[in-house]
Image: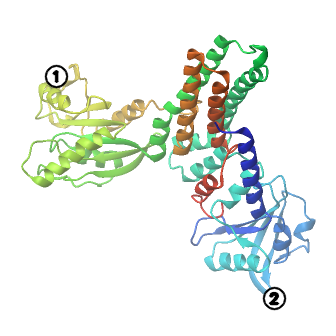
Amino acid sequence: MISDSIIIFTNFAIKILLMDNTRSTICAIATAPGNGAIAVIRVSGPDAIAISNSIFYSKNKIEIKDKEAYSIIFGDIKEGEELIDEVLISIFKNPKSYTGEDSIEISCHGSIYIQQRILELLIKNGAILAEPGEFTQRAFLNGKMDLAQAEGVADLIASESRAMHQISIQQLKGGFSSELELLRAEMLNFSALIELELDFSEEDVEFADRTALSKLVNKLDKSISKLLDSFSYGNAIKNGVPVTIVGRPNAGKSTLLNALLNEERAIVSSIAGTTRDTIEELFVIGGVQFRFIDTAGLRKTEDEIEQIGVQRALDKIEKSAFYIYLFDSQLMSIQDVAEDLSQLSQDVPRIIVANKLDLISTERLSEFTNSLLKPLTISARQKGGIEDLKKALLEKINYKENQNNIVISNIRHFEALTKAKEAIDRVLVGIESNIQTDFLAMDMRDASYFIGSITGNISNDDVLGNIFQNFCIGK
């Protein structure tokens, strides 16, 4: 059992220790490293306005501290009489800022020298250099966002496709957190009813109908299971949906990879067995990032290196979301294709594709299109049918733009939800077995604990450290 009093005390102590760090004023470059037209330097903390004011000279002789929030001032950054740069100062006052503290953003020219000089001046005047993710960590500690939303910030910055952008935005805006809060409220309601019975155990009073409790717990179990089921999709979207391209030598796998990427990435040759190892490339189709894996041709061979390549191809199939089986429509019959497919994984979804459409007759084409296998037909060399294949790829992962379903893509969230479900399952077994009420309460408190750990209602210093150290400095 995880004691509620221990949880509350531990979280209070951790928050106090972390809040001690927020008494300092931090600064960092918020834009990407290197030269650019404009760079932004962020300052946040109790002395952000005073420190920035000490190095800034307004063109209109106005001091930063005298300006209202959400205003911008034009002026100079100076060290003594030396002009460093002309800048714009954006002012944000607590609590209505990203971090919940007084914050300043200095927009200067993008010279690395200028950026470093301004940072040095800020530090000389009392600021300290921010740690990775410290601005967002302060936003979390000051109640501007929960932990799941903070992780959404990191995912949003790293998003490389429209699908990942949508998942990250949904998480940042609190869609996932709202779902978890509803779950946790139901769990707390369950615990309250159960623990009320414990208080009156000697009077043998039953406050909660067991049928109603079972219905509630089953509802919780289904909701958590739905979130867990979304992880395979979310994780694939985050890291690129893995799709292996397999087939016999000279089927055109490397040519297909090049056609999908629209560049000459893989070596194409008429010599069978050119590809000995796997080649992986990321490419975005319709807002979804795919990870295409070109493999060695599938055949029996005495060549030891080629044997390893063939085995790697088979291994990659097992790790794919689905695979493309590509065959040469000139050389192979429907029976040949069926024989190959029978040797490949039956558990992994696949798309069957007939290649070299440009080299076969209409009669031969109809043999394939009218068969039970119903392969897609393409010419990888002439890029015919490639757009149809891309549509099939999107359909295969069931991708729908602007989908409203909550999708999880974070392994920490998946692990916490898994533990919460295990606790919920114990409650279900306990209700069916009519075990003592206090054991049900213990398991439900465990489930609530793991749900709370996702949003940061329950957290520890190690978890926070691991999350925010992966952020970029300045965010």
The answer to whether residue 133 shows anywhere in this view is yes
Q: Residue at the location (75% across, 47% down)? A: 9
Nearest the eye: 341 or 371: 341
98 sits to left or right of 231:
right
As drawn, 273 above or below 380: below
Q: Residue at the location (64% across, 42% down)? A: 453
| Distance from the alpha carbon under mark 2 to that under mark 1 | 84 Å
Q: Quadrant location of the C terminus?
A: bottom right
Q: Which residue is mark 2?
A: 81
Q: Which residue is mark 1?
A: 367
289 sits to left or right of 414:
left
Residue 351, position in %: x, y? 30, 31
As drawn, 314 above or below 112: above
321 sits to left or right of 305:
right
Residue 68, position in %: x, y? 90, 59
Secondary element type, mark 1: helix
Residue 250, position in %: x, y? 15, 44
User: Which mark's residue is nearer the viewer, 2 or 1?
Assistant: 2
Q: Amino acid at mark 2?
A: Glu
> Nearer the N terminus, badge 2 or badge 1?
2
Secondary element type, mark 2: loop
Q: Amino acid at mark 1?
A: Glu
Q: Residue furthest left?
A: 302
Q: How many marks?
A: 2
Residue 338, by quadrant, is top left
The colour scheme used to paint the residues is rainbow
Q: Residue at the location (81% across, 67% down)? A: 48
